[in-house]
Amino acid sequence: MENAKCKSKVIIKLGGSLLEKGRDVIQSLRDYVEEKEKEKDRALTMILIPGGGPFADAVRNLSGDTHIPISEEAAHWMAVFAMHQYGIFLASGEIEIPLVESVDEIDKAGPICILLPYKILKAANCLPHTWAVTSDTIAAFVANKIGEKTFIKLTDVDGILDEKGHLIKKISAKEMFKKEKKGCIDAELPGFLTQNKMSCIIVNGNFPNRIIDVIEEKETNCTKLF
Ligand SMILES: Nc1ncnc2c1ncn2[C@@H]1O[C@H](COP(=O)(O)OP(=O)(O)OP(=O)(O)O)[C@@H](O)[C@H]1O
Ligand SMILES: [Mg+2]
């Protein structure tokens, strides 16, 4: 049958903590995706969701440092646009990566794209507008909207570390929900994953080989939040 090749989708949230290396990470991922395109029946579509990084910190600091009052509602949407700023920055490297704003645009964009979430969030408008919900939970929400029950979170550490600084290789979202300190993930993420029967794999983006290992379901240093 023509066009029988079924593309699997990989959703990757690229943390603001990877500001310096983010564009290099994308280059490695694009090389990988293009390599897979050449392999028969191995094609995949990679959808990158930007974090907030220093752009979201600017929103946080506005009320913190300057004591200028800002409503949670306004701060929420300003922080969503922080993700857009980071996305535009990430797309502006040596290689051009298409920016998309809707699920429909993904298939037309090619094997790899950066998704800017404002329109999708505004249309659904069902996540609480608080600082507990930031780019990790938004990435989970968007993955769910796309029909994927898992996503990869890239950050600047190996995963969730315990009190002694050791990597937690596997932890349930329910157990994480009970922990007061959530480490490198949004406060709301464990609850959102549990409610929607989703999972997330946290990987250090400074090691692109680990990202590929996770995509290929090979053992590597990471935290599986299930
Ligand atoms: N228990 C912990 N385990 C892992 N990281 C932790 C822990 N406690 C604090 N952190 C910090 O969390 C940071 C990563 O989270 P952070 O929110 O800063 O990055 P990000 O999620 O990649 O970026 P963004 O939220 O801007 O998209 C690490 O640099 C680490 O220092
Ligand atoms: Mg974060």
Image (cartoon, rainbow, N blue to C red):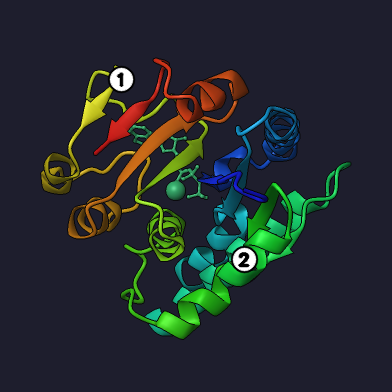
- Give percent across and percent down for residue 65: 51, 66
Q: Is residue 29 above or below residue 143?
A: above
For this orientation, the residue located farthest to the right is: 94
Amino acid type assigned to the residue bearing label 1 in the image: Gly
Judged left or right of residue 172, residue 160 is right
Tell me what residue is drawn at x 89 percent, y 41 percent.
94
Q: Which mark is residue 60?
A: none
- Other residues around mark 1 within 10 Å, as few (<14) / some (14–19) / many (≥20): few
Nearer to the camera, 140 or 104: 104
Task: Determine the image quadrant of residue 151.
Answer: top left
- Other residues around mark 2 within 10 Å, as few (<14) / some (14–19) / many (≥20): many
Nearer to the camera, 61 or 203: 203
- Give percent across and percent down for residue 14: 56, 45
Residue labelled with disc 1: 165
Tell me what residue is drawn at x 52 percent, y 69 percent.
79
Mark 1, secondary structure of its residue: loop
Task: Determine the image quadrant of residue 108.
Answer: bottom right
Report whether the residue tagged 1 is closer than 8 Å to ligand 1. Answer: no
- Give percent across and percent down for residue 46: 61, 45
Residue labelled with disc 2: 116
Amino acid type assigned to the residue bearing label 2 in the image: Leu
